Image (spheres, grey):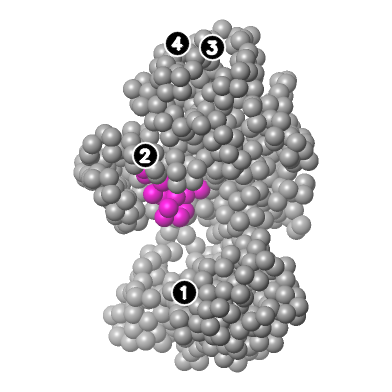
């Protein structure tokens, strides 16, 4: 199997485009699905286009509609697509994992809930990351396990496992998987409903976990959370004196194995809650276990195929609803995975003619009637549901998942704000109170500090600074709005204007000065006229690269220049360094120098980069630092925009001066 020159998000995009080959998908929808901006999604698509060209496929771009995968040579494409598929066992679980916390959760789910023992190498291949990234994740896990006196064992040959007292393992599982994001998929009012019934969700969780382990039934954390909630709601129905309908099926059932596990769960739940379940309840739970069990998952090709169909149809319903309705949500992994965890047993129930009542139906429908009807309409179009009559009680579960995603989306829209106030704590708290009253749903005030407390650490993840003093001459990378400590009407209008435009540049003179100052300082840090080439004569790629590398601070010796160029050539083996028909972005496969610098060449008649790109007009040679690359992402963002800006390219070709290049950088 080949090592792919793609990161996890690019691999995921190929999978999404493959699943939607009969239609164009917009960059906004693609970006939402992998949790990046539409601009970043377009950047990924450009790299994918270069990659797919070698394997009999291409990306068709239709203005106003988006991107569509076109396969010209199925044989060549299938060979690489099989490699993409074989690099992971569960496409969605793996391909949505790009953040450290997600990788941590994935590893812990494998170890604690699925009982798998894999090596660092195997995890690295599954997650499309380096071994060092996995080791860093393990270090984070070790720190968390210390509080439970658990030890993480990393055996090169045997794999990664956890040693310690079983009771402490249960405590860790409960706290990490059950309390870290308390069953978000069913929203807060679900907990309020269950709390009123005095049900111990934690105890039910332990019962389900232990009995599934004893029965060797492996459930993901999402599936286990769904099962615990179904069990808890069944207990609520019984305590409220509601009769559970007899279990009926129009098909012969074959889950005798799961019935035994379900009966054990029921027996322990009865002892815990001092109630008696109807005999048929074990069949409902067994049906759930049968749908979610992955005992034979890796060997069951049919299951995998059906799972991919389900995955695709859920995404299609969500993306269509997002484009066509007024519901605002993000296609995040929690939403899709939560829906999959619910849909698998739902489809099994539909095929068997089994209905499941939802005690929350009346509350959900009365509070969210409009959302209920919209969600029901779009999901009812799923081909897998064709020919089945889905009860409104079932729809209520699905609606809850989407409502949770809507709530998460609202929270993500909040701006993280730091307030700078120099007139004393009393005034500062008054200003904070006024801001929260006026903009409570739109901003999240992280801290109220004085100007002298402000540093880079304080500004991490901050979207906006609201200050009572003029700090426009300072060097900040984020917007600043100056207000009165009394927050007058003009101040409120300014903040409302910024919130309305979200993260767009704040349209005021002071903010413009800050932005331009920041861009100018960033430009001077990375670029120099000594590293800027205007080429009016024919030149070879080799000579051009050699001349550009020689201008870098850390590569003044010939041997170092040659080493740098070899690393560039090595990087190109993993994927083309040409990012558009006009621009090449050569860089070494690993950082080699201490200084972070960029050399730029503007070639009037173009340089032949390779057989497919014979007239590259712009060459951007990047030498990242081994130590620090502060601000580099903002520099690369400029070139991403430059790639798609034909007017800016034309301007630089007409006037290739260093001054014009700097002006273009600062203006964008």
Query: Magenta span covers which residues?
Result: 94-109
Between residues 346 and 63, which one lies in front from this camera angle? 346
Q: Residue at x 56, y 34 (%)?
A: 196
Task: Look at the numbered discs 1 and 3 and tell me whether their residues touch, using CB distance below 8 Å.
Answer: no
Residue at mark 1 to residue at mark 4: CA–CA distance: 58 Å
Is residue 576 shown to the viewer in this render? yes
Tell which circle, 1 or 2, labels the residue nearer the N-terminal end: 2
Residue at mark 1 to residue at mark 2: CA–CA distance: 33 Å
Residue highlighted by disc 1: 458
Residue at mark 2 to residue at mark 3: CA–CA distance: 30 Å
Please tell me the numbered disc located at residue 60. none
Is residue 500 on the magenta stretch? no
Residue highlighted by disc 4: 256
Rate crowding at label 2 as few (under 14), some (14 to 19) or many (20 or more) other CA atoms within 10 Å. Answer: many
In this rendering, which labeled residue sits more in front, label 4 or label 3? 3
Task: Look at the numbered discs 4 and 3 and tell me whether their residues touch, using CB distance below 8 Å.
Answer: no
Tell which circle, 4 or 3, labels the residue nearer the N-terminal end: 4
Q: Residue at x 72, y 75 (%)?
A: 492
In this rendering, which labeled residue sits more in front, label 1 or label 4? 1
Rate crowding at label 1 as few (under 14), some (14 to 19) or many (20 or more) other CA atoms within 10 Å. Answer: few
Q: Is residue 618 above or below residue 318?
A: below
Between residues 137 and 360, which one lies in front from this camera angle? 360
Task: Look at the numbered discs 1 and 2 and tell me whether their residues touch, using CB distance below 8 Å.
Answer: no
Disc 4 element? helix
Tell which circle, 1 or 4, labels the residue nearer the N-terminal end: 4
Disc 1 element? loop
Residue highlighted by disc 2: 173
Tell which circle, 1 or 3, labels the residue nearer the N-terminal end: 3
In this rendering, which labeled residue sits more in front, label 2 or label 4? 2
């Amino acid at each position: 199997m080949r090592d792919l020159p793609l990161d996890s998000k690019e691999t995921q995009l190929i999978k999404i485009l493959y699943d939607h080959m009969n239609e164009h998908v917009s960059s906004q929808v693609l970006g939402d699905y992998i949790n990046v901006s539409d601009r970043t999604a377009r950047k990924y698509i450009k790299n994918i286009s270069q990659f797919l060209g070698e394997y009999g496929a291409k990306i068709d771009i239709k203005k106003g509609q988006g991107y569509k995968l076109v396969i010209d040579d199925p044989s060549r494409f299938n060979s690489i697509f099989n490699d993409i598929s074989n690099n992971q066992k569960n496409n969605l679980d793996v391909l949505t994992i790009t953040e450290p916390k997600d990788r941590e959760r994935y590893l812990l789910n494998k170890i604690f809930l699925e009982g798998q023992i894999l090596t660092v190498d195997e995890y690295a291949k599954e997650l499309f990351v380096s071994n060092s990234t996995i080791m860093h994740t393990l270090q984070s896990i070790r720190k968390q396990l210390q509080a439970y006196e658990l030890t993480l064992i990393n055996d090169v040959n045997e794999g990664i496992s956890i040693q310690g007292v079983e009771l402490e393992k249960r405590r860790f599982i409960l706290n990490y998987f059950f309390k870290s994001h308390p069953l978000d998929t069913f929203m807060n009012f679900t907990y309020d409903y269950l709390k009123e019934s005095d049900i111990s969700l934690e105890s039910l969780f332990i019962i389900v976990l232990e009995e599934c382990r004893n029965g060797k039934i492996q459930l993901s954390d999402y599936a286990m959370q769904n099962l615990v909630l179904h069990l808890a709601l069944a207990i609520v129905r019984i305590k409220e004196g509601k009769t559970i309908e007899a279990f009926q099926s129009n098909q012969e059932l074959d889950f005798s194995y799961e019935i035994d596990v379900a009966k054990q769960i029921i027996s322990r739940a009865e002892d815990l809650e001092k109630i008696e379940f109807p005999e048929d309840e074990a069949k409902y739970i067994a049906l759930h276990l049968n749908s979610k069990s992955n005992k034979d998952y890796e060997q069951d090709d049919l299951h995998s195929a059906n799972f991919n169909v389900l995955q695709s149809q859920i995404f299609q319903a969500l993306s269509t609803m997002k484009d066509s309705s007024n519901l605002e949500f993000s296609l995040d992994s929690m939403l899709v995975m939560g829906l999959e965890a619910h849909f698998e047993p739902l489809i099994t129930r539909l095929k068997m003619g089994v209905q499941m009542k939802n005690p929350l139906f009346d509350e959900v429908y009365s509070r969210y009637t409009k959302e209920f009807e919209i969600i029901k309409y779009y999901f009812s179009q799923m081909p897998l549901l064709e020919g089945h009559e889905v009860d409104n009680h079932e729809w209520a579960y699905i609606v809850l998942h989407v409502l949770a995603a809507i709530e998460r989306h609202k929270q993500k829209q909040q701006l993280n704000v730091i307030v700078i106030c120099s007139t004393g704590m009393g005034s500062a708290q008054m200003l904070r109170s006024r801001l929260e009253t006026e903009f409570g749903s739109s901003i999240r005030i992280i801290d109220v500090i004085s100007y002298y407390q402000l540093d880079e650490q304080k500004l991490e993840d901050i979207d906006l600074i609201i200050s009572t003093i003029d700090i426009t001459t300072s060097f900040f990378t984020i917007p600043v709005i100056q207000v009165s400590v009394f927050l007058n009407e003009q101040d409120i209008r300014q903040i409302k204007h910024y919130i309305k435009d979200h993260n767009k540049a704040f349209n005021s003179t002071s903010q413009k000065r800050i932005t331009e100052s920041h861009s100018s300082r960033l430009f001077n840090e990375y670029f120099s006229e000594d590293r800027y080439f205007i080429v009016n004569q024919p030149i070879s790629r080799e000579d051009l690269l050699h001349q550009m590398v020689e201008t870098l601070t850390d590569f003044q010796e010939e041997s170092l220049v040659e080493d740098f160029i070899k690393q560039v050539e090595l990087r190109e083996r993993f994927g083309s360094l040409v990012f558009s028909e006009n621009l090449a972005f050569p860089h070494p496969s690993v950082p080699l120098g201490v200084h972070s610098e960029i050399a730029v060449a503007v070639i009037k008649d173009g340089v032949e980069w390779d057989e497919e790109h014979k007239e590259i007009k712009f060459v951007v040679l990047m030498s990242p630092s081994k130590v620090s690359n502060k601000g580099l992402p903002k520099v690369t963002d400029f070139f991403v925009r430059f790639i798609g800006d034909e007017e800016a390219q034309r301007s630089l070709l007409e006037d290739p001066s260093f001054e014009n290049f700097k002006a273009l950088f600062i203006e964008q």
